[in-house]
Amino acid sequence: MKQKIVIKACMPCDGCRSKALGVAAKADGVISMAITGDDKDRLEVVGVGVDVTCLVICLRKKVRYAEN
C-alpha cells in the first residue's frame, strides 16, 4: 500500500535540497519524492514500506534539522 510522508526539514539552499533528495532516493521503497511548501522546507516522499524513522534520522545526519 502506498504511503505519503511529509517531512519538515531545514533546507535554506539548493545544495541542502539536493542532499535531502539524495538521502530520500537511497531509502528502500521510495517511488517518488518532491520538495514542497511555500518556503520549500518540506520533503514529500511517496513509497511502499518506507521506514519513516530511519529516513528522518538519515536526514538529520545530512541536512541537520528534520521532523515528521
Image (tube, rainbow, N blue to C red):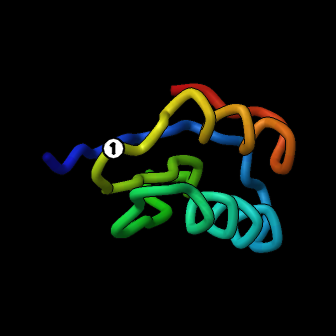
| Percent x, y of residue 35 | 49, 63
| Percent x, y of residue 47 | 31, 55
Q: Amino acid at mark 1?
A: Gly
Q: How many marks?
A: 1
Q: In the image, what residue occupies the spot 60% across and 41% down?
A: 55
For label 1, count other residues whose C-alpha is less than 10 Å away and answer few (under 14), some (14-19) or many (20+).
few
Q: In the image, what residue occupies the spot 72% across and 32% down?
A: 57
The relative height of residue 24 versus residue 42 in the rendered view (above or below) is below
Q: In the image, what residue occupies the spot 32% across and 56% down?
A: 46
Secondary structure category for the residue under label 1:
loop
| Percent x, y of residue 7 | 51, 38
Q: In the image, what residue occupies the spot 36% across and 41% down?
A: 5
Q: Is residue 48 left or right of residue 44?
A: left
Give the residue furthest to the left. Answer: 1
The relative height of residue 8 versus residue 39 in the rendered view (above or below) is above
Using the image as rendered, state which of residue 51 and residue 64 is in the foreground.
51
According to the picture, the residue beneath numbered tag 1 turns out to be 49
Using the image as rendered, state which of residue 22 and residue 49 is in the foreground.
49
- The quarter of the displayed image where residue 8 is located: top right
